[in-house]
Image (spheres, grey):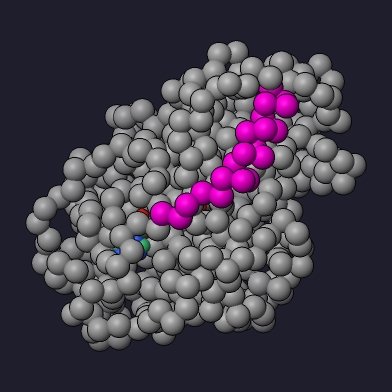
């Protein structure tokens, strides 16, 4: 079972028409809806399950510039700016705070990568630095063992995944957006060569534009429209502890464990590496695009046949819009966590901070991360379907960049000047002759 998520009261009446329909109530869809509603644009958000039921409530909660691909830097800097104002804007506690994010160097290769990243990030003026010796000890109070150094970005932060997207959805609602939970979108209708309506399980909504922010489902949705959107799923497992006093405040990543102090005083803990990749028909379909990343990541990825493999094997890629679609058959993608990986993370945390010994694990969960071949998102118009904008493929780091990404998607869907240059995020980048560039993700 997934983590407990703050609730959002769904609107009840399906409107006949609106300006923009947003598909998906994760951090991206809710941020897009808030951005549109704040501009006075009519918007309806349709979510097949409940707000933040998938990745957006299951993540670690880090809002980090640290280690970002250079192509994402302008958007993440903008997102951090939006996060800092989020509690005021939403009139809620999203839990955002500037606690800093740190990557600990465990080898010479790590040090070299961190230094190269620092050189790239310098023009952004985000205060990124290498910490050593006493400075590092101060950021890991009570830690056992000694480390070579760490990359520290003090202007990074974190928010509470079980609170943020619901708070943003409620704020959008207050500003006029309609939020329809338990309302899967089965497909899109076109008229005069462009999007004219979405067909939901509860009826159709005429609209001028659609933002598709369907997370791990977006590739399938696009396939049903005849659009190729390379996307694969990666299983990640997480747990949270009961409150711990005197623990570290900075979100910190080591190979064996990543940890974040939560607003409730507990910690969200997971293994830093070790992702399970279910083998599915899309693994073959998109092999060409994914080969460079697979070679780079090597043993960090663990390909497996699992329940998701069987679910996707032989599953339809097109369906009639007057019958239940795959989005209704699996309301919430809720994979079981890999308990062995979680145990390893807990043991590593205890070795690092002995005060975690005996602290109860309150909950464990799994989440499917949607990953693109170059590990940066698609935030893009879809050339083959005028009126459709996709915002997906956030590849394990979409929570922090969510507010800016949702806003950028809203810009693109309504023809506004984009808040940052969207070119790196174009959907066509894998078939327009561009080389596949994989960033320094560290
Ligand atoms: C374990 C884990 C740890 C992570 N840690 C971090 C982190 O620390 N920092 C960070 O920045 N990111 C992190 N991420 C990544 C981050 O959670 C995601 O990138 C981000 O939440 C993606 O948001 P989204 O809105 O695109 O997708 P989602 O949150 O998955 O939302 C998509 C929504 O669309 C709905 N939907 C799909 N199809 C339809 C349809 N046809 N009709 C209606 N609704 C539909 C789904 O039900 C779902 O609710 C992590 C992810 C995981 C799983």
Residue 338: in sight, yes or no?
A: yes
Q: Is residue 203 left or right of residue 432?
A: left
Q: Quadrant of residue 45?
A: bottom left
Q: Relative to 348, does residue 442 appear above or below in the rendering?
A: below
Residue nearest the observer in this picture, 82 or 369: 369
Q: Residue at x 36, y 48 (%)?
A: 52
Residue 386 is left or right of residue 253, and the answer is left
For residue 289, which quarter of the picture? Answer: bottom right
Q: Could you tell me which residue is drawn at 63 percent across and 55 percent down?
A: 275
Q: Main secondary structure of the magenta part?
A: helix
Is 382 rendered above or below residue 117? Answer: below
User: x%, y% of residue 298?
Assistant: 76, 62
Which quadrant holds residue 218? Answer: bottom left
On screen, residue 216 above or below 176:
below
Percent x, y for residue 396? 56, 52
Q: Position of residue 405 (x, y in %)?
A: 47, 53
Q: Is residue 390 magenta?
A: no
x and y percentages locating residue 440 in the rendered image? 74, 53
Q: Is residue 352 left or right of residue 416?
A: right
| Residue 83 seen by the camera | no
- The magenta-colored residue range is 334-353
**Residue at 28% in and 50% down:** 50
Judging depth in this view, the residue of 24 and 436 nearest the camera is 24
């Amino acid at each position: 079972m997934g983590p407990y998520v703050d609730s959002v009261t769904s609107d009840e009446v399906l409107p006949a028409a609106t300006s923009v329909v947003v598909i998906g109530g994760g951090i991206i869809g809710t941020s897009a809806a808030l951005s549109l509603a704040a501009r006075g644009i009519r918007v309806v958000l349709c979510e097949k399950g409940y707000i933040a039921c998938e990745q957006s409530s299951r993540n670690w909660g880090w809002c980090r510039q640290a280690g970002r691909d250079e192509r994402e830097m302008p958007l993440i800097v903008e997102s951090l700016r939006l996060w800092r104002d989020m509690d005021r804007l939403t009139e809620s506690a999203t839990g955002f705070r500037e606690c800093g994010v740190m990557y600990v160097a465990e080898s010479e290769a790590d040090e070299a990568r961190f230094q190269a990243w620092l050189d790239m990030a310098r023009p952004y003026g985000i205060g990124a630095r290498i910490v050593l010796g006493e400075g590092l000890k101060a950021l890991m109070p009570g830690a056992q063992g000694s480390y070579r150094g760490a990359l520290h970005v003090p202007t990074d932060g974190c928010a509470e995944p079980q609170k943020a997207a619901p708070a943003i959805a409620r704020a959008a609602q207050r500003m006029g957006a309609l939020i329809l939970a338990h309302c899967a979108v089965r497909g899109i209708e076109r008229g005069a060569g462009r999007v004219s309506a979405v067909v939901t399980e509860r009826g159709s909504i005429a609209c001028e534009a659609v933002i598709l922010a369907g997370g791990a489902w977006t590739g399938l949705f696009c396939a049903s429209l005849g659009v190729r959107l390379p996307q694969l799923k990666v299983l990640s497992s997480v747990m949270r502890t009961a409150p711990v006093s005197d623990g570290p405040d900075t979100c910190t990543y080591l190979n064996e464990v990543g940890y974040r102090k939560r607003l409730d005083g507990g910690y969200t803990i997971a293994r830093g590496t070790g992702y399970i990749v279910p083998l599915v028909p899309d693994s073959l379909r998109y092999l060409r695009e994914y080969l460079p990343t697979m070679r780079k990541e090597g043993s960090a990825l663990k390909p497996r046949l699992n329940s998701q493999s069987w679910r996707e094997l032989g599953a339809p890629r097109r369906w009639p819009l007057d019958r239940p679609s795959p989005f209704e058959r699996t309301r919430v993608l809720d994979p079981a966590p890999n308990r062995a990986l979680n145990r390893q993370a807990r043991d590593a945390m205890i070795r690092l901070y002995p005060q975690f010994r005996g602290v109860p694990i309150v909950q464990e969960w799994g989440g499917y991360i949607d990953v693109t071949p170059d590990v940066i998102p698609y935030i893009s118009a879809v050339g083959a379907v005028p009126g459709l904008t996709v915002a997906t493929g956030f590849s394990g780091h979409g929570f922090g960049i969510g507010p800016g990404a949702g806003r950028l998607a809203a810009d693109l869907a309504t023809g506004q000047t984009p808040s940052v240059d969207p070119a790196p995020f174009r959907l066509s980048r894998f078939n327009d002759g561009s080389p596949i560039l994989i960033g320094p993700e560290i």
